[in-house]
Amino acid sequence: MKSVRVVLLLLVASAIALTGCDNHRRYRAPGAPPPPGYALAQVEQDGFRAGVEDGQRDLSRGRYQPKKNLGYRQTPGYDARMGKHSDFQAAYRRGYIRGYDQAYRRR
């Protein structure tokens, strides 16, 4: 009698443990992380957009001063998970100058 109770208890416990497992069919493991240059490419795009905005503004004021703008000097958006700050800053400023020049010179 005792062994029947143990078997029933195990059956009930396994049924409870497995309840809902069928609902996880849609689970997908997260994809691979982006390649190392991806984050810096995005940073450069952000710098480009900021440079375009500042270049258009400075064009209307008649002054070409990309390195004096706050956006260039501060390089906003850095997060330590992105890697070294110097790499982030170089990518942002590279994009910023490209965008600024394009907007200011209307290329």
Image (cartoon, grey):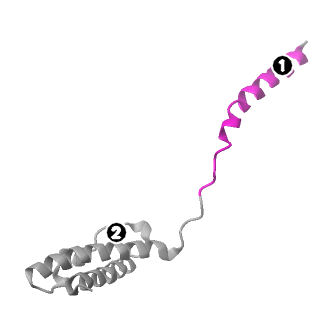
Q: Which residue is mark 2?
A: 78
- For residue 82, which quarter of the picture? bottom left
Is 34 displayed left or right of 54 in the figure? right
First of labels 2, 1 by sequence position: 1
Pinpoint residue 38: horizontal percent, then vertical percent: 48, 73
- For the point 43% across and 76% down, the residue is 41
Q: Which mark is residue 60?
A: none
Magenta region, main secondary structure? helix
Query: Range of the magenta residues?
Result: 2-30
Pinpoint residue 106: horizontal percent, then vertical percent: 23, 84
Q: Which residue is mark 1?
A: 8
Q: Secondary structure at mark 1?
A: helix
Which is nearer the eye, 75 or 45?
Answer: 45
Residue 74 against residue 27 in the figure, above or below: below
Residue 4 included in the magenta stretch of the image:
yes
- For the point 88% across and 15% down, the residue is 2
Residue 7 included in the magenta stretch of the image:
yes
